[in-house]
Amino acid sequence: MGLSRGFTFKQFHIDHDRCAMKVGTDGILLGAWAPLDGVTRALDIGSGSGLIALMLAQRSDPDCEITGVEIDKEAVIQARENVLASPWSARVQMQGGAIQQHEAEPYDLIVSNPPYFGAGQPFVDPARAQARHRGALDSRDLLDACSRLLSPRGRVAMVLPTAFADEIISVLPNYDLHELCYVAVITREGKAANRVLLQLSRELNRCERGEIVIHSADGGYSNRYIQLTAPFYLKM
């Protein structure tokens, strides 16, 4: 649907006209892919419209509490409205402010679709610039928050451009975090990956590697993408 009407999923609706970052494939992939086994507390860093938090709510057990943290005030207001209109308003909350100041009990799962453009990338809209640029949340801030807020057996799940994923992986030892799963995201069959679904943990294990193709060579959605997202898309 258009921006003014938001985006309707099978079990909830997202309005995003007051959010710098709109509903997109990156967020949908992360919300559908993040691991939820045994999760009773989840944190969404840079929650925007609340999309990923609500996807987690749909997939998780009824006792799972989900917190979204977002620095943009207008986005927080709209995310709260989206949550209130959803079936899971009793266990999803949206908090305003920077993740660097967020204090809470440890989380079993931390997810993030973080800003990833360098400081030189121009945007006319200041809110969109904040949402897309790493100035407000660079890799150090993100990993510091994950290290500080993650439970001992918890998982971190992120969707990142490949170069940013490499940057994150290179500094993990400084934050007592380890690469657990690396899934290359290929927009269309035959093309190079331009995104990564990345899982981290405190435990040192062999990293699982794989790939997800969104569109097959004929332009249709791949079977794997359909399998992941069918519980959400209206016409999938």
Image (cartoon, rainbow, N blue to C red):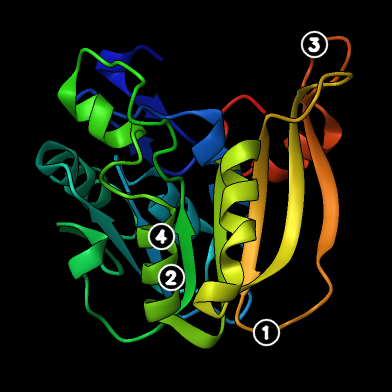
From the viewer's perspective, tell me whether residue 223 is left or right of residue 39. Answer: right
- Report whether 196 appears left or right of 86: right
The mark closer to the camera, 2 or 4, is: 4
Badge 2: residue crowd in 10 Å (few <14, some 14–19, many ≥20): many
- Reading the chain from its start, which is encountered first: label 2 or label 3? 2
Amino acid type for the residue under numbered disc 1: Glu
Q: Secondary structure at mark 2?
A: helix
Q: CA distance from mark 2 to mark 4?
A: 10 Å
Image quadrant assignment for residue 227: top right
Identity, as a three-letter code, of the amino acid under mark 2: Cys
Query: Callout 3 environment at 10 Å: few (<14), some (14 to 19), or many (20+)?
Result: few
Q: Which mark is residue 203?
A: 1
Q: CA distance from mark 4 to mark 3?
A: 38 Å
* Residue at 57% from the left image edge and 63% from the top image edge: 171
Disc nearer the start of the sequence (4/3): 4
Q: Quadrant of the C terminus?
A: top right
Image vertical order of residue 108 relative to residue 181, above or below: below
- Looking at the picture, how far across and down is residue 175, in whole percent? 50, 75
Say which amino acid is labelled 4.
Arg
- Residue mark closest to the camera, 2 vs 3: 2
Q: Earlier in the sequence, mark 1 or mark 3?
A: 1
Label 4 sits on residue:
140
Rendering quarter of residue 147: bottom left
Q: Is residue 178 above or below residue 199?
A: below
Circle 3 residue: 219
- 235 versus 177 height, above or below: above
- Mark in the foreground, 4 or 3: 4
Q: Nearer the viewer, residue 100 or 75?
A: 100
Task: Report whether residue 102 is seen.
Answer: yes
Identify the residue shown where x is 26% and y is 51%. Answer: 83
